[in-house]
Amino acid sequence: MPWNIPIFLTWIRVLLIPVFTVLFYLPENWLDPQTVNWAAAFIFALAAITDWFDGFLARLWKQTSDFGAFLDPVADKLMVAVALLLLVSLNRTYVIFAIIIIGREITISALREWMAQMGKRGSVAVATIGKFKTAAQMVAIFLLLAGLHDFYGVNLIYLGNILMFIASVLTIWSMFYYLKMAWKEFKE
């Protein structure tokens, strides 16, 4: 297993998952609920930033590796899945959004693995729509984790769920886009 700063940042993201999760299961008298919400939101934001930063540095420093290419999406999907499950359990978002997003991630991960085995991983490489989906999803999760109904007159839960709806639509759209790209390879 290679060690470099991009892989180290990815491992930090993996290690933040239990820290992030435990916050919501601490005894109630340890931290007030809004402190837990903000701490979780900022840990999630830190993880999202390391996701962008590790990929940027890996490309900049030419430190890409097969292990990094494997670990990075696993870390991303775990963080998002855990956050969505926590948000559903806290009644801050809808189960359907979690089902759509997690289901798509599993489907596309399996599709990418299958295409990689066929030597055609590039045909399902990340597209612009996937980047828009990720941006909407990350901002939505951050807002929902903050958990405020009134933040300077803005209902973050409501706004987060609007963005989660947008992310879910983009999730379905991007899934069909990737399936269409893969279908072209199957037909050949």
Image (tube, rainbow, N blue to C red):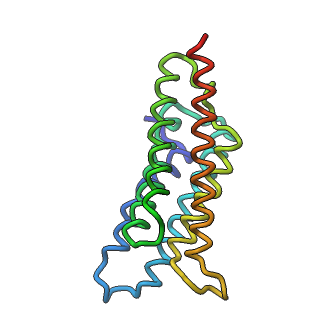
Q: Quadrant of the N terminus?
A: top left
Q: Nearer the viewer, residue 40 or 89?
A: 89
Q: In this view of the protein, can residue 16 be seen by the observer?
A: no
> Residue drawn 47% across and 37% down?
107
Tell me residue 150's x, y (percent): 59, 86
Q: Quadrant of residue 122?
A: top right
- Percent position (x, y) of residue 121? 57, 24
Q: Position of residue 46 (x, y in %)?
A: 56, 63
Residue closest to the far top: 188
The structure residue drawn at horizontal position 54% and vertical position 82%, both measured from the top left corner, is 148
* Residue in the foreground of this view, choosing between 7 and 98: 98
Q: Is residue 3 above or below residue 43?
A: above
Residue 182 placement, left or right of 79: right
Q: Is residue 5 above or below residue 94?
A: above
Q: Residue drawn 57% across and 58% down?
A: 48
As rendered, which of 166 and 113 lies closer to the eye? 166
Q: Residue at x 33, y 86 (%)?
A: 30
Q: Position of residue 15 (x, y in %)?
A: 41, 57
Report the side of 180 relative to 93 (left or right): right
Task: Compare residues 149 and 146 and report the one nearer the observer.
Answer: 149
Residue 13, visible in the rendered structure: yes
Figure label count: 0
Q: Is residue 68 above or below residue 116?
A: below
- In which quadrant will I find the C terminus? top right
- Residue 82 lies, with reference to residue 111, above or below; the image says below
Name the quadrant containing residue 25: bottom left
